[in-house]
Image: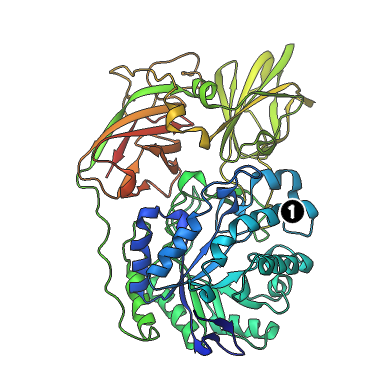
């Protein structure tokens, strides 16, 4: 057994000064069969510690119903076998560019801005979650022979709030649950962040991507003693759909890393290996200096321009960091592991069956809810997916403007089954007026809940109302289609239609399609919104990249495993497929196309 403590100037391992050379690797963004390889890559880069968040909403989809919480314990065991130490950041809020910052939708829906405070309802939920989760951590602390040396209190709280009582309560809860290793907080090196996010008696650390000397100087004004640590050294960044791909110069990033270490500080490279936002769990952000502007959805890839790329391969940044870290590693670095096998033979498959979105909703959707006003996603119990809102325009009446208030995030609107337009602003209206009587369907898709800033915990769906001229329409029928509903047994009940031989788009243009199968009626082909089924015969299975030629926006499953969202808006053009997901021989792919244009897939 060993001890790990916070000294006046250094971390102390069994009483001796030690520097932590850590890298962020989120186990939930990496297929479990590939954990060992990714940990080996971090070791080869010169790191001796690994840091991970824990996303609450991934493991408690409904109050008191838990998923595979033990995955954290299995990962920490893998860390121990790799000869590394571990830093655990359990939240309850994690940011991490993850859906809702890791907070469950069923909690933020009713509580709103009361989350991350001393609100009794929030504390009760956090207490229940931590008592379920933390045994995975406590049993694997360094003083019990495990790898865990540090546990975080909340996450970047100073960027959000100033409820010191809440932070102190959370620290006490961690201790009460058996956490005996040192606790810490992490915030940006700015006075208001460190003031709002620090806890007396708990080590404060700083997050930044450059300017280590200035950042640590600010930290020292708030914490005169204790070890210095950059808990998030941002060596890259993430992307949003519809923007340019973000890249950070490798030489510049290595110089910033060197500056941190020259200050005598410990470091956590964020991200050492980013992985993938499988399952549609990518979050979103608001634009502007105050993070309260337009919504920007995060892409499926969490490559982060990290030194170990999304597929586990070393980049130029890896080799540059390895050179810097070798001076501080205390011995020769391990050899770089061989990369995982790649797909031997590229393959392309066309859809052999299709079901329009309306029929998919009938089979896989939740029960319809009738309400005078449109219920939010949270009220419908939908975390990731979409909701069809149906409302009638009374008549007879002349054409008026049809608009939506409080829309989040995107609505595709059909009037009497005919596509009328797409709305993607919080207050928006159709380009053409609508006469009554008419039946209006609004298919609203969540692009990811905000994970950072003051708009955290905002609801999804139609949060205001639908107006015809100035008059609110009432009498909604709402039905959710959750991504979790796409399980093999359930999808097997979908009445797929065989596609005719001429179903493909002509001259590269997809045929128009609505949720019922066509623009004005059930049209030919499978190129409207709906679920496409593709059979792929794979030889030489291994890691691959999947693209949806002609597809606009939607989600992909390979053998029941959800790869995440694709979107022609870019910058991401293909989805990473972990080798363990593919099978030699027959594989089944489902493509849920939400706008029209899909039909087949390509695997490279």
| Quarter assignment of residue 54 | bottom right
- Classify mark 1: helix, strand or loop: helix
Q: Please state if 177 lies on the left or on the right of 531 as rendered.
A: right
Residue positioned 63% across, 76% down in the render = 189
Residue positioned 45% across, 59% down in the render = 74
| Quarter assignment of residue 508 | top left
| Quarter assignment of residue 495 | top left
Q: Please state if 303 lies on the left or on the right of 433 as rendered.
A: left
What residue does disc 1 label? 124
In this rendering, the answer to whether 488 lies above or below 238 is above
Residue closer to the observer: 383 or 406: 383
In this rendering, the answer to whether 583 lies above or below 208 is above
Residue 106 visible in image: yes
Q: Please state if 425 lies on the left or on the right of 509 as rendered.
A: right
Residue positioned 61% across, 74% down in the render = 180
Tell me residue 175's x, y (percent).
Answer: 67, 69
How does the figure colour the protein chain or chains? rainbow
């Amino acid at each position: 057994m060993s001890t790990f403590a916070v000294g006046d100037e250094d971390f102390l391992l069994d009483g001796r000064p030690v520097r932590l050379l850590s890298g962020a690797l989120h186990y939930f963004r990496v297929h479990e069969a590939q954990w060992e390889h990714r940990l080996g890559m971090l070791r080869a880069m010169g790191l001796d510690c690994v840091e991970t968040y824990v996303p609450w909403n991934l493991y408690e989809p409904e109050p008191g119903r838990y998923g595979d919480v033990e995955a954290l314990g299995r990962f920490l065991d893998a860390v121990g076998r790799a000869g590394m130490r571990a830093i655990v950041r359990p939240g309850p809020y994690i940011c991490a560019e993850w859906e809702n910052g890791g907070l469950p939708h069923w909690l933020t829906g009713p509580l709103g801005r009361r989350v991350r405070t001393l609100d009794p309802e929030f504390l009760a939920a956090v207490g229940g979650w931590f008592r379920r989760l933390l045994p995975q951590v406590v049993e694997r602390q360094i003083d019990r022979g495990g790898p865990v040396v540090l546990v975080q209190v909340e996450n970047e709280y100073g960027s959000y709030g100033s409820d010191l009582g809440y932070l102190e309560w959370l620290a006490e809860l961690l201790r009460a649950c058996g956490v005996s290793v040192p606790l810490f907080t992490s915030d940006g090196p700015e006075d208001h962040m460190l003031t709002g996010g620090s806890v007396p008696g708990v080590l404060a650390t700083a997050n930044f991507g450059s300017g280590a000397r200035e950042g640590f100087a600010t930290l020292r004004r708030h914490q005169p003693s204790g070890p210095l640590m950059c808990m998030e050294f941002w060596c890259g960044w993430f992307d949003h759909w519809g923007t340019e791909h973000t890249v950070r110069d490798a030489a510049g990033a290595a110089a910033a890393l060197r500056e941190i270490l020259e200050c005598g500080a410990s470091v956590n490279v964020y991200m050492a290996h980013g992985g993938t936002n499988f399952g549609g769990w990518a979050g979103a952000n608001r634009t502007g200096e105050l993070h309260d502007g337009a919504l920007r959805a995060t892409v499926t890839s969490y490559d982060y321009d990290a030194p170990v790329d999304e597929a586990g391969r070393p980049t130029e940044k890896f080799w540059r960091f390895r050179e810097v870290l070798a001076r501080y590693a205390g011995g020769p670095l391990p050899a770089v592991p061989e990369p995982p096998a790649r797909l031997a033979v590229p393959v392309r498959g066309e859809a052999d069956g299709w079901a329009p979105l309306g029929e998919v909703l009938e089979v896989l959707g939740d029960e319809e809810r009738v309400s005078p006003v449109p219920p939010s996603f949270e009220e419908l119990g939908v975390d990731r997916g979409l909701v069809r809102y149906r409302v009638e325009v009374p008549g007879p009446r002349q054409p008026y403007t049809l608009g939506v208030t409080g829309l989040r995030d995107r609505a595709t609107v059909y009037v009497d089954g005919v596509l009328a337009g797409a709305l993607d602003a919080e207050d928006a209206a159709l380009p053409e007026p609508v006469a009554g009587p008419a039946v209006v369907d609004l298919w609203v898709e969540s692009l990811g809940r905000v994970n950072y800033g003051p708009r955290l915990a905002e609801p999804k769906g139609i949060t205001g109302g639908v107006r015809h001229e100035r008059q609110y329409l009432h009498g909604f029928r709402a039905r959710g289609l959750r991504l979790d509903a796409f399980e093999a047994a359930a999808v097997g009940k979908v009445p797929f239609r065989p596609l005719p031989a001429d179903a493909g788009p002509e001259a590269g243009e997809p045929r128009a399609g609505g949720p019922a199968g066509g623009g004005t009626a059930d049209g030919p082909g499978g190129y409207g919104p709906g679920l496409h089924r593709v059979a792929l015969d794979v030889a030489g299975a291994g890691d691959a990249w999947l693209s949806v030629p002609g597809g606009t926006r939607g989600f992909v499953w390979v053998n029941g495993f959800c790869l995440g969202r694709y979107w022609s808006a870019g910058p991401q053009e293909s989805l990473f497929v972990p080798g363990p997901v593919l099978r030699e021989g027959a594989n089944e792919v489902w493509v849920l196309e939400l706008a029209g244009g899909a039909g087949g897939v390509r695997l490279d």
